Amino acid sequence: MIRNELLICAGGACITSGEKSVKDALIEELNSHSIQEEVQVIETGCMGACDLGPIVVVYPEGTFYQKVTPETARLIVSEHLVKGRVVESLLYTEPETQQKVASGAEIPFYTRQVKRVLRNCGVIDPLSIEEYIARDGYFALATALEMSPEDIIGVVTESGLRGRGGAGFPTGFKWKATRDAKGSPKYVVCNGDEGDPGAFMDRSVLEGDPHSVIEAMTIAGYAVGAQRGYMYVRAEYPLAIERFEWALRKAREYGFLGENILGSGFSFDIEIRIGAGAFVCGEETALLRSIEGKRGTPSVKPPFPAQAGLWNRPTLINNVETYANIPQIITKGAQWFRSVGSPKSPGTKVFALAGNVQNTGLVEVPMGTTLRELVFDIGGGIPGGKKFKAAQTGGPSGGVITADYLDMPIDFDTVKELGTIMGSGGLIILDEDSCMVDVAKFYLGFTVDESCGKCTPCREGTRQMYHTMERICEGKGRDGDIEQLSRLAEVVRDTSLCGLGQSAPNPVLSTLRFYQDEYRAHIYDKKCPSHVCKHLLTYSVSADKCVGCTACARQCPSHAISGEVKKAHVIDQSKCSKCGTCYEVCRFGAIQKE
Amino acid sequence: MKSLEELKRIKEETLKEMDLRQAKERGKIVVAMGTCGIAAGAKDTLLSIIDELDKQGIHDVKVVQSGCMGLCDREPTVEVSMKDQPAVVYGDVDDANARRIIREHVGAGKVVADLVIKRENI
Amino acid sequence: METRMLNVRINGRAYEVPEGITILKAAQEYANIDIPTLCYLEGISEEGACAICVVEVKGAKNLQRACVVKVTDGMEVWTNTARVREARKLNVELLLANHPTDCFTCEKNQICRLRELAAEVGVREVEFPRTRSEWLPFDETSLSLIRDPNKCVLCRRCVNVCAKVQSVYAIDIVGRGSNSMVSTFLDEGLGNVECVNCGQCLLVCPTGAITERSEIPGVWKALGNPDKVVVVETAPAVRVAIGEEFGMPDGTQATGKMVAALRGLGFNQVFDTDFSADLTIMEEGYELIGRLKNGGTLPLITSCSPGWIKFAETFFPNVLDHVSSCKSPQQMFGTVTKTYWAEKMGLDPRNVVVVSIMPCTAKKFEKERPEMKTAFHYWQEKLGLRDDEAFNDVDYVLTTREAAQMIRESGMDFANLPDEEFDRPLGESSGAAVIFGATGGVMEAALRTGYEVLTNRTLEKLEFEDVRGLAGIKSAEVDIDGTILRVAVANGLGNARALMDQVQKGESPYQFIEIMCCPGGCLGGGGQPISDHPDVKQRRAEAIYREDAGKPIRKSHENPEILEIYKEFLGEPNSEKAHHLLHTEYCDRSCD
């Protein structure tokens, strides 16, 4: 007789934080109290609050325990399960009121979210197809197989669902184009390459609710007339691959994949293809080339994959999150889907909230949610009492949204006006100590590394831009650099063969637009206002704080510090290599960094 | 998998197993599991309650434990708070009494007066 | 089915163009606008890599690539806006930023497409620095070709030609992003991989990244050595192309001027490879007859193309017994010169230097094949030579381009030289020999002789039209007194592969196959003048057939010098002596 369930978050972040040892400790402790028959331990997909992991939720109470260690895990058993006493020290504390929150459902991080794509993540055991079915899984497939393909496409179109991979292309339109295209056989592909640094929305869906994607791909196959599907996952997601593979096996066992699904006469199956470490293979045509066994370089569009994709056949390719929306659209209808979000961008979006924000993790909110809500209400604000500076969206393809636009509702179209893109959902929060030039340089460096090298503007142009950014951050900026960056950015954006190159200049363009003064400071004053760019820092000793302990002088690798014992020391700027060691070792706060 | 009917059957069965995770809005039953409670057999009371709820097909009521409620000489003690109704604390809740409380109070809505030891002020 | 006509506006003017046409072609053929391109090579390399041919299309967010984007009805294209010009200029600048600046001494500086492009788009300043930190090593492992990856602009034409046209796949793009470069398997170098030395990559390379291994210095040295008798042989395809190097029209028959120029360079004898082409026909014609009569291995496949030979040795080593054992005309010539001719002239073969002028880069490899030292073996005992004193039958191979370069260096005004004649006795040739330079030529030459020998009758019509033309695979049925001889001709190794797959499976319907490594045959060889005229091969072929038609002797077996060499020296075709001197062996290179 099971009287309690312990749900342990087994998303990637929690696993890295030691979820396995927490689970082992729980099971051990349950055994030692002989209640292992009454308490079920279930590992679920990502619960979203990655900063608070490892997370254990006790049902039926719904008590939310955060930052659990193997030691404190034992308390959950011995205190809560055995004696009914909630373990206060493990509860979430509201940062402003310092109040303890027992129920997970009441934590502000969760209360504002609308979990549709993540409906099952953190709730079910991703390895259990029965639990997926219990939450209405595969009912959409059963329903869809009774509809005509045209009607299915009609519902998807009416729902207004737009591609969640970043481009925001109307999904129904794509499905219709693939259905109408001439050629056979047709294919359905899922883009699980998720390359944006810091993005892990798709990973969490694949790890936490793989059946939602399998079901959606099968429905898509039926709608466009394909019998083969390919799930392309990046090799860096071994857990997602493992769970998806298991889910495929289960789906076949239950007859949701294979011949004559649910007696409809429709046959469909899915094969996993693993990437090989190329960000550019997230671009749809490069991805298709990769599946074909060729070099993953983009091809000229048109023709588009809907007309000529895999092996030149009509191919539907959508993102993981886009697919994850499909089953509910079928079971609950287009109007239900449109009931949240904004008119031109209905539905929800999963964001990976990271950076200088209190609550980092995975959040799903209606489109049109403002940045303020995301950063402050859900994100819990900026830690350390710092001020919000900007939010970087869309990864290496996007730009920044400044504090002036905190109340702007975020959807596909509004962010475009600001010179950035929604992207796949990466949302990096930057506080007042961030250097925007450095941020742009970071993303540009990523793009330079990942450029496939085929077309001149991306291969050479981004490299030249990065070269200039490096000079600027090293204090070697010159008059004319901003003009050169703009000139390069224009042509790289205008003539690159694929989205990688076309959007590579965005971080630079966006930061130039809103933070040109920071660029000027780097170039003309040779200073980094945020004190981030190493080469532009000046380290000096505050004579009034220095006690002459000689620690810095002894550690300085450039022998740039001189001074007698118990007398104020001095740093020779001409020798200083700006390594920052003195700043680290001074116990008296006597080193000034500016 | 042949049909929608089979899907529904799997859903029903699995939901029951996932019962504990469902939102239970209609009421909450708290079993005191302090040392005194456990000594008096609160553990068995808890299991009986869960078993009877299942037998009665009642899935929208939560069963949780708490520490000592303070009424140590009447252990095992059980608090029943149904939605929109005042909370009631029962004492000396053994297996038989537990099942009565479930059938009559939780199931039929009638407080089991002879077992009540504390009532919320109206 | 009629092609639908579409309405398009280019730079504000309206045109009607057929459906399916690209913006590039539409502009070129209908609006007289040559949108500049770099990486585009019709039908072979259409990757949109260089971003030079970009144009503005109304309604499109970004600039579009004219070379691959097809015209749609109602499209409005602008090829000349400030935005377009800026994009082209900047992309060229980006290429120039990382390009070596030794243009003054680069051997391709007269025909470099990148240099031409920079002038076309008007680049006057490169504001970008070099970002590549290292200089990449040259690939000098091949006997025929040299690669300088530093000059590569990653247009991918070479990769596509090697893959799609030649089906050799010796090179590909390696690495990613700004570290990507064209290379071979594990960077082993062209000389160590499947590369067949055909030089098709060289012909399409827009910069000086691929060049031939020059043998000019060695030839100058030999010419200046009074102790050496330096003899030159020239391939049939050279004479109809060399004029292009001096501004003469495509397809000029410049045989007489070529002979005059070579004599002007100082060669002691100017002989003609066509002579040994006739010799080849004698040997191979009788080889075919022998196989037909005695149930030998069929189909017989020609063997004068060294690129094709290396291809066969690499990819089809199991069916090498099909390939004729005859050497190529170049090699037969070298052997004959250093044995028959040296003996006749009373010369020590060690003082005879044979230089061949070829439309081919693979011949540089061929002359170094270890088995191509037949003359040495012939003389070894007589002169008491040690093994380490071995010498090649052919000492130097110059491409048509290299020969032209030497002529330029000597200051001769090629186009205005008076015609001169080849020297004798190795300078007489038939029309059948000259057509070797075109695809189908060897076949036709062999048929002219084979037919007459087998039937003992004279051919009424000497021209076998079925095997002429630039189509990739041609086939014909020749009625030889009731027996049907099925023949096929392939040019370009991709097409050769198709025929060889059949042979490999034992399913070939042919008895005699001619295979030429290069598209068009030798006239399209890797050593020929580099031209972007779309019909240059057609013109060269026409010149070759004109040359044939104008010759007094049109069949190999009627060449009096051929009859003489058999009478005096070789005996009969396929005699034992002929076999020792004029035939060769092949090896299995599949695991190299």
Image: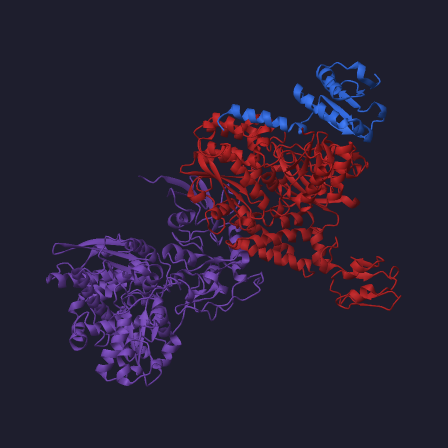
Chain colours: A red, B blue, C purple
Is residue A265 or residue C418 the one in the foreground? Answer: A265
Q: Give residue A372's position: percent from left, percent from top.
A: 72, 37
Q: Give residue C337's position: percent from left, percent from top.
A: 26, 77
Q: Give residue A17's position: percent from left, percent from top.
A: 69, 46
Name of the residue lying farthest toward the left = C457
- The image quarter containing residue C331 is bottom left
Q: Quadrant of the C terminus of chain A?
A: bottom right
- The answer to whether residue C422 is above or below residue C158 is below
Determine whether, in the image, residue C196 is placed left or right of residue A545: left
Is residue C544 or residue A555 the one in the foreground? Answer: A555
Residue A328 visible to the viewer: yes
Numbered circles on residues, count: 0
Determine whether, in the image, residue B97 is placed left or right of residue C161: right
Residue at (70%, 33%) from the top-left corner? Answer: A112
Q: Quadrant of the N terminus of chain A?
A: top right
Q: Give residue C462's position: percent from left, percent from top.
A: 16, 60
Determine whether, in the image, residue C360 is placed left or right of residue C567: right
- The answer to whether residue A77 is above or below residue C40 is above
- The image quarter containing residue A479 is bottom right
Residue A158 visible to the viewer: no
Residue at (25%, 58%) from the top-left corner? Answer: C513
Is residue A292 or residue A442 the one in the foreground? Answer: A292
Is residue A285 or residue C527 the one in the foreground? Answer: A285
- The answer to whether residue A570 is above or below residue B49 is below
Determine whether, in the image, residue C551 is placed left or right of residue C407: left
